[in-house]
Amino acid sequence: MRVLVTRPMDQAASTAMRLSALGHSVVCAPALVVFPIAAALPEGPFDLILATSAQAFAGLNPSPVLRSAPLACVGDKTAAAAAAAGFTARIVAPRAEALSARLIAEWTAGSALYLAGRERKPVLEDSLRAAGWRLSVVETYDARPVESWPAEIGVALQKGEIDAVLHYSPRSAAAALALIGAAGAARLSHYCLSEDIAATCRTFARAEKIFVASQPDEEALMTLVGPSSRLAQPPCKE
């Protein structure tokens, strides 16, 4: 199977390697471009720093006071990016819902600085505020849809040379499907990280061509895609 990966290139490379190991060919074409926002950070102090994406730390220059606060984040990649910026992760959870549940159960409500994306679900901040946390939210990154893909990807889609596409968020799915077009979206198989992403795909694709991972993580998504008997081409590179 030839699979289209629409994640930003720094994330797509690792996904492509996993797909290649399963025997699939891979085409990489980011649907969104992620860029840092030059945001002024408060001095603090805070009882906790929060982050749900590795992108939160791109171009960040936190003060020693902020670096000294414990960090709670979503995902190992976020924890690694935080470590590179001088933070120490105390809690790493697989999803925002799991992170808020652990904080509510295990920590006394206090003050927290949330390093967030401009486009985000309010799950983490809403649940923590409801539990008595005092949150300061600073948007440190944003994402914009790309205007177009390289011509060869459009040709491959038109010729039916791409079989499936992976979707990791509702916003990136909508951006990718707009570029793919109605005819291509109807023909492709759509592998979705979660049900809300699948709901976005149903606007463009047939229900029988949409598949949802059992858990909203890449391990479950790779299990959903499954292995191929065909030899894969080399994965895309950054």
Image: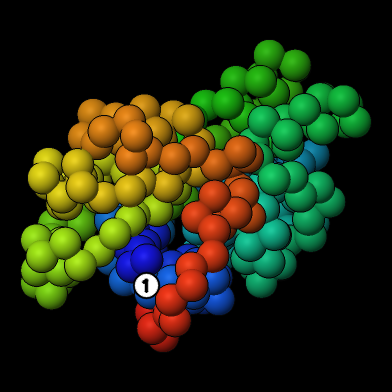
Identify the residue at horizontal 77%, vertical 27% (top origin). 101
Q: Position of residue 114 (x, y in %)?
A: 61, 40
Give the answer, above or below, for where 67 lies relative to 161: above
Per the image, the residue denoted by label 1 is 26
Asked if one can make out residue 238 in the rendered structure from this viewpoint, the answer is no
Q: Is residue 99 left or right of residue 13?
A: right
Identify the residue at horizontal 33%, vertical 48% (top origin). 189
Identify the residue at horizontal 43%, vertical 71% (top origin). 24
Give the answer, above or below, for where 207 lies relative to 68: above
Asked if one can make out residue 194 in the rendered structure from this viewpoint, the answer is yes
197, 95: nearer the viewer: 197
Q: Is residue 14 left or right of residue 181?
A: right
Q: Secondary structure at mark 1?
A: strand
237, 52: nearer the viewer: 237
Q: Position of residue 19 (x, y in %)?
A: 49, 69
Q: Residue furthest bottom?
A: 234
Q: Position of residue 35 (x, y in %)?
A: 36, 60
- The answer to which quarter of the image holds residue 4 is bottom left
Identify the residue at horizontal 63%, vertical 40% (top origin). 215
- The answer to which quarter of the image holds residue 63 is bottom right
Q: Amino acid at mark 1?
A: Val
9, 211: nearer the viewer: 211
Q: Residues within 10 Å of mark 1 (few under 14, many from 20)?
A: many
